[in-house]
Amino acid sequence: MAVPDPSDLPVDPDAPGPGPDVFRQRSRPPRRWDIALVIAAGGAVGGGARYLLTSSWPHATGGFPWATFVENVSGSLLLGALMVFLLEVWRPRRYTRPFLGVGVLGGYTTFSTYTADIDALLRAGAAPVAMAYLFGTLAAGFLATWTGLTVARRAVGITNTSRRSA
Protein backbone atom coordinates (compact mmCIF):
# COMPACT_ATOMS: atom_id res chain seq x y z
CA MET A 1 0.00 0.00 0.00
CA ALA A 2 1.41 3.39 -1.00
CA VAL A 3 1.69 6.33 1.39
CA PRO A 4 -0.87 9.04 0.56
CA ASP A 5 0.27 12.35 -0.86
CA PRO A 6 -0.31 15.05 1.83
CA SER A 7 -2.28 17.11 -0.68
CA ASP A 8 -4.84 14.27 -0.79
CA LEU A 9 -5.61 14.56 2.92
CA PRO A 10 -8.42 16.83 4.17
CA VAL A 11 -7.53 20.25 5.56
CA ASP A 12 -9.99 19.87 8.45
CA PRO A 13 -9.80 16.37 9.97
CA ASP A 14 -13.50 16.59 10.87
CA ALA A 15 -14.57 17.49 7.35
CA PRO A 16 -15.53 14.69 5.00
CA GLY A 17 -12.34 13.38 3.46
CA PRO A 18 -11.60 11.88 0.08
CA GLY A 19 -13.06 8.52 1.15
CA PRO A 20 -11.62 5.02 1.09
CA ASP A 21 -9.67 5.65 -2.10
CA VAL A 22 -7.35 8.09 -0.29
CA PHE A 23 -4.34 6.07 -1.47
CA ARG A 24 -5.29 6.31 -5.14
CA GLN A 25 -3.23 8.75 -7.17
CA ARG A 26 -5.02 11.87 -8.37
CA SER A 27 -4.31 13.42 -11.70
CA ARG A 28 -4.09 16.90 -10.15
CA PRO A 29 -3.98 18.07 -6.55
CA PRO A 30 -7.18 19.59 -5.11
CA ARG A 31 -7.39 23.36 -4.88
CA ARG A 32 -7.45 24.81 -1.39
CA TRP A 33 -7.76 28.51 -2.13
CA ASP A 34 -11.17 28.51 -0.53
CA ILE A 35 -9.70 27.40 2.81
CA ALA A 36 -6.93 30.01 2.60
CA LEU A 37 -9.50 32.74 1.90
CA VAL A 38 -11.70 31.62 4.80
CA ILE A 39 -8.69 31.67 7.16
CA ALA A 40 -7.68 35.11 5.87
CA ALA A 41 -11.20 36.47 6.43
CA GLY A 42 -11.25 35.06 9.96
CA GLY A 43 -7.77 36.44 10.61
CA ALA A 44 -8.95 39.89 9.58
CA VAL A 45 -11.81 39.71 12.08
CA GLY A 46 -9.63 38.37 14.91
CA GLY A 47 -6.71 40.67 14.14
CA GLY A 48 -9.07 43.65 14.04
CA ALA A 49 -10.46 42.75 17.46
CA ARG A 50 -6.92 42.36 18.83
CA TYR A 51 -5.89 45.73 17.38
CA LEU A 52 -8.87 47.47 18.99
CA LEU A 53 -8.13 45.93 22.39
CA THR A 54 -4.38 46.63 22.21
CA SER A 55 -4.80 50.22 21.05
CA SER A 56 -7.38 50.96 23.74
CA TRP A 57 -5.25 49.46 26.54
CA PRO A 58 -1.59 50.52 26.10
CA HIS A 59 1.04 49.75 28.72
CA ALA A 60 4.08 51.69 29.86
CA THR A 61 7.61 50.44 29.31
CA GLY A 62 8.32 47.92 32.05
CA GLY A 63 4.61 47.69 32.91
CA PHE A 64 2.49 44.56 32.72
CA PRO A 65 1.06 44.13 29.18
CA TRP A 66 -2.55 43.60 30.22
CA ALA A 67 -4.04 43.82 26.72
CA THR A 68 -1.91 40.96 25.39
CA PHE A 69 -2.55 38.95 28.55
CA VAL A 70 -6.32 39.38 28.18
CA GLU A 71 -6.21 38.59 24.45
CA ASN A 72 -4.32 35.35 24.98
CA VAL A 73 -6.27 34.17 28.01
CA SER A 74 -9.70 35.03 26.60
CA GLY A 75 -8.68 33.46 23.28
CA SER A 76 -7.69 30.28 25.12
CA LEU A 77 -11.07 30.24 26.87
CA LEU A 78 -12.91 30.69 23.58
CA LEU A 79 -10.79 28.06 21.84
CA GLY A 80 -11.57 25.52 24.56
CA ALA A 81 -15.30 26.17 24.19
CA LEU A 82 -15.08 26.17 20.39
CA MET A 83 -13.40 22.76 20.34
CA VAL A 84 -16.31 21.26 22.28
CA PHE A 85 -18.75 22.54 19.71
CA LEU A 86 -16.61 21.57 16.73
CA LEU A 87 -15.72 18.09 17.95
CA GLU A 88 -18.66 17.06 20.12
CA VAL A 89 -21.76 19.07 19.21
CA TRP A 90 -21.90 20.38 15.65
CA ARG A 91 -21.76 18.36 12.48
CA PRO A 92 -18.43 18.80 10.68
CA ARG A 93 -18.33 21.66 8.18
CA ARG A 94 -15.50 22.44 5.81
CA TYR A 95 -15.06 26.09 6.80
CA THR A 96 -16.00 26.27 10.49
CA ARG A 97 -12.70 25.26 12.10
CA PRO A 98 -10.48 27.13 9.61
CA PHE A 99 -12.55 30.32 9.95
CA LEU A 100 -13.18 30.36 13.70
CA GLY A 101 -10.27 28.38 15.13
CA VAL A 102 -7.40 29.23 12.82
CA GLY A 103 -8.61 32.55 11.44
CA VAL A 104 -10.57 34.44 14.10
CA LEU A 105 -8.94 33.03 17.24
CA GLY A 106 -5.54 32.67 15.59
CA GLY A 107 -5.72 36.33 14.58
CA TYR A 108 -7.05 37.42 17.96
CA THR A 109 -4.48 35.65 20.13
CA THR A 110 -0.92 36.79 19.87
CA PHE A 111 1.68 34.57 21.41
CA SER A 112 4.36 36.19 19.26
CA THR A 113 3.62 39.52 20.94
CA TYR A 114 3.69 37.68 24.26
CA THR A 115 7.30 36.64 23.65
CA ALA A 116 8.23 40.11 22.36
CA ASP A 117 6.66 41.63 25.49
CA ILE A 118 8.74 39.34 27.71
CA ASP A 119 11.89 40.38 25.84
CA ALA A 120 10.96 44.08 26.16
CA LEU A 121 10.30 43.68 29.89
CA LEU A 122 13.67 41.99 30.42
CA ARG A 123 15.46 44.70 28.41
CA ALA A 124 13.71 47.37 30.50
CA GLY A 125 15.05 45.74 33.67
CA ALA A 126 11.63 44.50 34.80
CA ALA A 127 12.61 40.86 35.29
CA PRO A 128 10.05 40.17 38.07
CA VAL A 129 7.23 41.53 35.88
CA ALA A 130 8.57 39.52 32.90
CA MET A 131 8.60 36.29 34.92
CA ALA A 132 5.13 36.94 36.35
CA TYR A 133 3.87 37.60 32.82
CA LEU A 134 5.67 34.56 31.38
CA PHE A 135 4.36 32.03 33.89
CA GLY A 136 1.09 33.82 34.66
CA THR A 137 0.03 33.82 31.02
CA LEU A 138 0.81 30.12 30.62
CA ALA A 139 -1.04 29.15 33.79
CA ALA A 140 -4.01 31.40 33.06
CA GLY A 141 -4.14 30.16 29.46
CA PHE A 142 -4.24 26.51 30.51
CA LEU A 143 -6.87 27.26 33.15
CA ALA A 144 -8.91 29.28 30.65
CA THR A 145 -8.82 26.45 28.08
CA TRP A 146 -9.94 23.93 30.69
CA THR A 147 -12.69 26.32 31.83
CA GLY A 148 -13.88 26.81 28.25
CA LEU A 149 -14.03 23.05 27.71
CA THR A 150 -15.82 22.44 31.01
CA VAL A 151 -18.36 25.27 30.73
CA ALA A 152 -19.19 24.44 27.11
CA ARG A 153 -19.68 20.74 27.90
CA ARG A 154 -21.95 21.57 30.82
CA ALA A 155 -23.88 24.12 28.76
CA VAL A 156 -24.77 21.48 26.16
CA GLY A 157 -25.25 18.67 28.67
CA ILE A 158 -22.18 16.55 27.89
CA THR A 159 -21.29 14.62 31.01
CA ASN A 160 -19.10 11.81 29.65
CA THR A 161 -15.87 13.27 28.30
CA SER A 162 -14.29 9.97 27.28
CA ARG A 163 -13.64 9.61 23.57
CA ARG A 164 -16.50 8.23 21.53
CA SER A 165 -15.94 4.81 20.06
CA ALA A 166 -15.31 4.76 16.34
Image: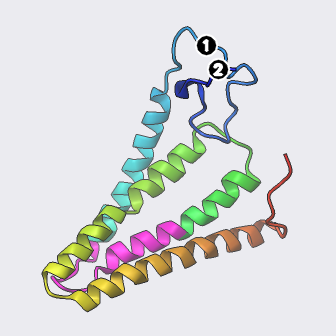
Q: Which residue occupies 45% across, 49% down?
A: 103
Image quarter hosting the N terminus? top right
Question: Is residue 165 depicted above or below 6 in this figure?
Answer: below
| Residue 58 relative to residue 81: left or right | left
Q: Nearer the viewer, residue 146 or 85?
A: 146
Residue at numbered disc 1: 25
Q: Position of residue 48 (x, y in %)?
A: 34, 56
Residue at numbered disc 2: 2
**Amino acid type indicated by mark 1:** Gln
Choose top left, top right, bottom left or bottom right for residue 15. Answer: top right
- Residue 55 — which label? none
For the residue carrying disc 1, how many other residues have a C-alpha within 10 Å: few (<14), some (14-19), or many (20+)? few
**The stretch drawn in magenta includes residue 67:** yes
Q: Where is residue 119 in the image (x, y as percent from the top left)?
A: 21, 73
Report the span colored magenta: 55-76
Give SS at disc 1.
loop
